[in-house]
Every structure is written in structure tokens, then in C-alpha cells.
């Protein structure tokens, strides 16, 4: 008798095999049209419409109102496809857009992200995945409620899941806006809401069922989009298509070019000019009020001079915009001067403040271009931060709600364990390419961009600077008319998206990479939206407020929550609140602090009880939020605390790695409170024994 599960898997092989061939054929067709003289704007719009259209069609075909289908994809996703969907869920805007960018800016220090995220999946496979699948149900708060009993652990878990997932969701929506505006030429804000339609078409209509099969398609798009430019640049620069094996030779050339730049007199002059700016900004802090008036007078005089000389209107308007954005009160002015001083001091160091690409870890791997501890951050401090960040990302991965939900969608415990192995394989396909891509891009910049006259700079520099001044900054600091490396500042968020243009590849590759970035951001956004809606609709409303609500109404309520949360996240993302990678790392620290102690103790320590687990979650999450609030600029500005300083950091640990303090604290609180209160009842102990008892057919 034929096995229905095997027949279903074979049908999936045929469907997605044809889809992969269709993707390659579509790329070839658009490439031929582009080479024949097609307009670039048309090519970008075609990629945008085609990719979002395919995802929307899958969402429409998979629409459902069945509770098990909506919340767990019917628990029938084969291990390989669940691993592929998990990888797409995982390959967020941070992984696709940000990882190579961080490696470009920080060199070896950026490997903290690859090591931490990959190691986290080992924790998931060993510690959590089999037990969560054996439990069944739909969400992590479901598990906490069943393990500990009572509504308090479930409600605390639901609140934490909403907080963690919303922070992470904002980053994905930001990535959607960045890529959509890059593809179609929209403004960033319009791109956010256009891309949001692609997110809602999947998660709103079909829940986990639609999201799963869309994510499989999205993984195919994003991995092709990442491999094509990396392999192409590898062949172009080294003649070897195996990028992970070829980039060592380019790394040596990059290191040699960096040594030449450090010794270049023009680069040293740029460093001296930035040091002078830092000193001037520091001097302004001595009398902030007088400095404010002096800045306004100087700009007014420059505007008057340009008018008298009949200078181009664009120059006059630029100075007017600068004058309009001057701080209007002493507090804002002081923060402005401190920030200007610190940025100038960082760029007054060799290589514009960046570490040597192949040098030891000397700066903090936070995704920025300067160490959070300031320009004088010590090597020991940087290494502490590197290890702390790796630990936080590992534990955060093992506690991220939208990843752990994937354990519920497989047919069995054995399939859940195997799907984690498949997910690691699919993730490594990208992570092994990211270091190579970073080196190839830096080689192109150092050899073909640095040293050009300003009137001959490539078009991608001007286009990305117009899209957002935070993505690309170019200024002739020493006035010699040539671009020095210290005068060029690139954001980690644009390195991958601009890599084909930087490498001189055909424009169709540029739009393919953008489509891949869009697939990565959309896939993770879908999973996060489901996590938030499930927590609010199931864990809060159904489990704690109205247990009589029908399954169909629960699904309808979840869909309404998806819509509202998506709109709120789009609004927050449109404010340009932060860079992609640091905010993602913060989300992982929050997840680790909130969930890991409660999950690990709930599975492996029978004495843990509900009040202990709830206390541990609240204590860990509270400490994590506090440490971030007093050390992130945005948090200190919100509470009127002024700019962050090294004195507010414990052991000089950057706030993105706050979980290195919060996880042990939450674990200790959970253990102490559990020991001081009643042990779990007989029903909880029986439940835990069943959780550790393998069921027939698992092995």
C-alpha cells in the first residue's frame, strides 16, 4: 500500500523543482531583455511584481480557517521542507542584508553573528526541538502553561513573545522598505507599506500553512540571489567558482591594500582633519549656547556669500537644510556636539575607524563602524564583547519563539529533530558565502573606487546617498578632489544590496539580489506576525479570557491581530530608528532572557514551578530591558538621560549582549523562587515524565 506521506513529499519535490527551474528561466529571460536595452526601472519593477505576486498566489491557494492548519500547517510538513522553511524564516533581513555588511565593516569581529546563530541551532536540536514536538500544541506560551500550570506563566510568556517578536518584526519591515525602495525607486516610507502587502497576503489568509509553503519558495529565491553574485565575483576576481575556497587569496590582497592606505599621506591628512573636527566639537561643549549662535551665524554668512556669487541653487538649498536642522535647545545641542565629536574621533583613526579585515578582534561586533566603547576600546574589552555576543545569539536562537514554533509543524518528533539538521544545512549554504562576499566587495572598493576623482565616482555611490544619507556618506574632507578610504562611509545595510553594482555585474543581478533580500525579510516577517497574533489571540484571549470561543473565531481573531500589528510595525519601521543588525541582536538578547531559563528548567528540572518560572522570566527580561534602556542612545533619549557613556556599561559589555547578565540572573531567580515555594503537583510531574518518554515510532 502506498505511503501517503511519501507521495505528498514526492509531489512537493516536483512542484518546487519546477519552481526552481522557473526562477532560473525568469532570471535568464529578464537578463536577455535587460541586455537588449530594457529600462532598468522596468527590470526592477518586474522583479518586485513577479516575486510578491508568486508569494501572494501561494498565500491565496493555501488560505484556511482550520485551526490546526492555520496555527501548525496541519502538522504534516516533511523534515526537509520544514528545514527549508525554517531556514527562510531564519534568513531574515539581518542574515541576508546585514551579515556580509558587518563582516565588511568589522572583519573577523563580525563572525560573532555567524558563530552565534549557527551554534544556537545545535542547542535547539539537542535541548528543545524533540520535547516541544512531543508536547504538540501551537505556541511557546502553550508549552509554558501546560508545563507549569495556571495562567501566569502563559501570560508572562505571551507578553514576552509579543515584545521580542515585535522588535524583530520592525527590523524585517525596515528591510522590506529598504529593498522595495531600491527595486522600484519608491521613497523608503512608501516602500515599507508596499512591501507590507506581500507580508499580509500570506500570513493573513493562510496562517502557518500559507507561510510554510511560501517560505520554501522564498528560500529558493534568496539562496539563488545570494549565490549568483558571490560566485560571479569569485570567478571575476580569482577564476575559482568555489567562493569559500577562493576568497583567501583576495583577503591577502585586501590586507596589503589596507597597509598601503594606512601609510598614504593623503589618508593621514584626512585623519588629521577629522581629529580637528573632533577637537572643535569638544570645544563647543564648553559653551553650548554660544556655540549654537555661532553655528547659525556661520551658516547664514555662507548662504549670503553663495547668493552674492550666484552659486548653484542646490548648494544654497543644502546649507538651508543644514540650518533648519540645527538644534534648537541646549540639551539637543549638547547631544549633537557629543555625537559629532565621537563620530569624528572614530573616523580620525586609520582606515576611517574600521579594523584591518584580517586583524584580531579589536572592535565590538555590533554592526557599526566604531566600537561602542569609543575610539579607545581595549582589545580585552572587544574580546569580552565578542564572546558575550556569541553566547547571547546562541541562547537567543534556542529561545526565539518564531523559530521554536517550527517544531510543531512536523509529523513526528523524529521529523522535528531531522528538520533542525536540514535547517542547519540550508543556513550554512548562505553563511559560508557571507565572509567571501564581504572580502570580494571590499576588494572592489579598495582597488576600483578609492583614489577616483570626485567627478568620476561610480553611479551607485550617488544613487545610494540620495536614497538615504545614513547608507552612504562621501565627503572631500582634505579638498584634494580624490576619494580617500577615510572619506567614504558605507552602512552595513547596503553592502549586499549594492554588491553587484560595486562589482560591475549586470543590472539584472542587482535586482535579483534585491528580490532575494525581499524574500528574506518577508519570510521572517510572516513568521513573526504569526507568533504575535497567536500569542494574543490564543494565549491571551482564548486561554485566559474567553475559553468558549470557537476555533473558527480564534482563527478570525488571529487574522485581525495580524493586520493591526503589521500596520503598527510598518509605522515604527518608517521612522528609521536603527541599523538592522544591532537591533536584531537586541531582539535575541531579549528572547534569551525571557524564555531560555523557563524552557530549559521546565524540561530538565522537575522542581521548577510556575511562580519560579514566571519570576525568572520577569527578572531576566526586566534586567535585559533596563540594561538596554540605559545604554542605547534611543533609550536614554526616551528617559531624558543624555548620551550613553562607558561608565553605564558593566564590564564594558555592549547593550546588544545584555542577555549575558540577564540569563544567569533569570535562571538564579527561577531556581531560588522555585525552592522557596511549593513543588509542582503530581499532575505536573506526571506530565513531565510523559514528555521524557519516547513514543512508538519516534526513533
Image: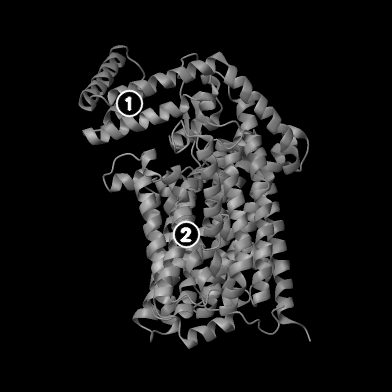
The N terminus lies in quadrant: bottom right
The alpha-carbon separation of the residues under discs 2 and 1 comes to 54 Å
- What residue is pinned by disc 1? 317
Q: Is residue 109 left or right of residue 618?
A: right
Q: Is residue 551 above or below residue 535?
A: below
Q: Residue at x 48, y 19 (%)?
A: 270
Q: Residue at x 48, y 88 (%)?
A: 682
Q: Residue at x 42, y 43 (%)?
A: 187
Of the two numbered discs 2 and 1 on the same chain, state the one appearing first in sequence.
Answer: 1
Residue occupying the far top of the picture: 309
Q: How many residues crowd mark 1 within 10 Å: few (<14), some (14–19), many (20+)?
A: few
* Residue at disc 2, secondary structure: helix
Q: Is residue 109 above or below residue 451?
A: below
Image position, residue 480 (x, y; %): 49, 13
Q: Is residue 451 left or right of residue 164?
A: right
Report the mark closest to the observer, 2 or 1: 2
Which residue is nearer to you in this view: 631 or 142?
631
Which residue is nearer to you in this view: 114 or 189?
114
* Residue at disc 1, secondary structure: helix
Q: Which mark is residue 664?
A: 2
Q: Is residue 269 above or below residue 201?
A: above
Amino acid at each position: 500500500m502506498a505511503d501517503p506521506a511519501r507521495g505528498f513529499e514526492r509531489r512537493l519535490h516536483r512542484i518546487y523543482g519546477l519552481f526552481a527551474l522557473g526562477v532560473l528561466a525568469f532570471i535568464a529571460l529578464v537578463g536577455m531583455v535587460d541586455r537588449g536595452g530594457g529600462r532598468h526601472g522596468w527590470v526592477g519593477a518586474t522583479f518586485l511584481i513577479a516575486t510578491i505576486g508568486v508569494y501572494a498566489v501561494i498565500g491565496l491557494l493555501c488560505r484556511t480557517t482550520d485551526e490546526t492548519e492555520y496555527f501548525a500547517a496541519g502538522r504534516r510538513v516533511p523534515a526537509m521542507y520544514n528545514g527549508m522553511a525554517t531556514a527562510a524564516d531564519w534568513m531574515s533581513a539581518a542574515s541576508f542584508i546585514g551579515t556580509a555588511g558587518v563582516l565588511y565593516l568589522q572583519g573577523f569581529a563580525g563572525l560573532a553573528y555567524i558563530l552565534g546563530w549557527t551554534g544556537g541551532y545545535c542547542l535547539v536540536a539537542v535541548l528543545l526541538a524533540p520535547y516541544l514536538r512531543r508536547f504538540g500544541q501551537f505556541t511557546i506560551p502553550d508549552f509554558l502553561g501546560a508545563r507549569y500550570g495556571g495562567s501566569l506563566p502563559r501570560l508572562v510568556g505571551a507578553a514576552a513573545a509579543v515584545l521580542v517578536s515585535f522588535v524583530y518584526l520592525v527590523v524585517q519591515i525596515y528591510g522590506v522598505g529598504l529593498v522595495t525602495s531600491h527595486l522600484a525607486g519608491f521613497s523608503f516610507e512608501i516602500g515599507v507599506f508596499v512591501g507590507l502587502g506581500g507580508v499580509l497576503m500570506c500570513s493573513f489568509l493562510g496562517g502557518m500553512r500559507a507561510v510554510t509553503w511560501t517560505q520554501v519558495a522564498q528560500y529558493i529565491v534568496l539562496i539563488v540571489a545570494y549565490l549568483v553574485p558571490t560566485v560571479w565575483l569569485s570567478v571575476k576576481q580569482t577564476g575559482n567558482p568555489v567562493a569559500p575556497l577562493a576568497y583567501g587569496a583576495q583577503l591577502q590582497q585586501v590586507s596589503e591594500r589596507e597597509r598601503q592606505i594606512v601609510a598614504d599621506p593623503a589618508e593621514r591628512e584626512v585623519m588629521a582633519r577629522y581629529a580637528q573636527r573632533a577637537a572643535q566639537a569638544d570645544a563647543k561643549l564648553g559653551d553650548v549656547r554660544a556655540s549654537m549662535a555661532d553655528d547659525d551665524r556661520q551658516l547664514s554668512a555662507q548662504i549670503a556669500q553663495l547668493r552674492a556669487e550666484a552659486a548653484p541653487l542646490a548648494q544654497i538649498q543644502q546649507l538651508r537644510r543644514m540650518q533648519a536642522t540645527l538644534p534648537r535647545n541646549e540639551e539637543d545641542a549638547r547631544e549633537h556636539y557629543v555625537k559629532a565629536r565621537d563620530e569624528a574621533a572614530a573616523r580620525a583613526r586609520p582606515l576611517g575607524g574600521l579594523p584591518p579585515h584580517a586583524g584580531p578582534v579589536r572592535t565590538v561586533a555590533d554592526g557599526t563602524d566604531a566600537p561602542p566603547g569609543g575610539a579607545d576600546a581595549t582589545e580585552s574589552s572587544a574580546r569580552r564583547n565578542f564572546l558575550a555576543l556569541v553566547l547571547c545569539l546562541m541562547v537567543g536562537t534556542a529561545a526565539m519563539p518564531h523559530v521554536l514554533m517550527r517544531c510543531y509543524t512536523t509529523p513526528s518528533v523524529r521529523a522535528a529533530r531531522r528538520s533542525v539538521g536540514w535547517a542547519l544545512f540550508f543556513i550554512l549554504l548562505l553563511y559560508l558565502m557571507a565572509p567571501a562576499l564581504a572580502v570580494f566587495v571590499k576588494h572592489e572598493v579598495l582597488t576600483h573606487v578609492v583614489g577616483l576623482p570626485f567627478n568620476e565616482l561610480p553611479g551607485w555611490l550617488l544613487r545610494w546617498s540620495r536614497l538615504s544619507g545614513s547608507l552612504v556618506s562621501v565627503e572631500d574632507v582634505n579638498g584634494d578632489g580624490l576619494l580617500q578610504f577615510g572619506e567614504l562611509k558605507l552602512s552595513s545595510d547596503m553592502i549586499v544590496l549594492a554588491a553587484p553594482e560595486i562589482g560591475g555585474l549586470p543590472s539584472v543581478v542587482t535586482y535579483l539580489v534585491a528580490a532575494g533580500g525581499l524574500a528574506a525579510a518577508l519570510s521572517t516577517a510572516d513568521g513573526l506576525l504569526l507568533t504575535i497574533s497567536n500569542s494574543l489571540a490564543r494565549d491571551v484571549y482564548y486561554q485566559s479570557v474567553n475559553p468558549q470561543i470557537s476555533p473558527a473565531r480564534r482563527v478570525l481573531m488571529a487574522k485581525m491581530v495580524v493586520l493591526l500589528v503589521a500596520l503598527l510595525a510598518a509605522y515604527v519601521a518608517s521612522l528609521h530608528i536603527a541599523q538592522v543588525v544591532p537591533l536584531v541582536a537586541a531582539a535575541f538578547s531579549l528572547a534569551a532572557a525571557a524564555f531560555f531559563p523557563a524552557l530549559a528548567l521546565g524540561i530538565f528540572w522537575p522542581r521548577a514551578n510556575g511562580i519560579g518560572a514566571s519570576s525568572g522570566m520577569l527578572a531576566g527580561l526586566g534586567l535585559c530591558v533596563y540594561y538596554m534602556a540605559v545604554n542605547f542612545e534611543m533609550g536614554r533619549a526616551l528617559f531624558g538621560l543624555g548620551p550613553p557613556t562607558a561608565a553605564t556599561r558593566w564590564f564594558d559589555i555592549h547593550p546588544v549582549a545584555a542577555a549575558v547578565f540577564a540569563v544567569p540572573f533569570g535562571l538564579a531567580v527561577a531556581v531560588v523562587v522555585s525552592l522557596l515555594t511549593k513543588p509542582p503537583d503530581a499532575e505536573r510531574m506526571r506530565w513531565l515524565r510523559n514528555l521524557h518518554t519516547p513514543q512508538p515510532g519516534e526513533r
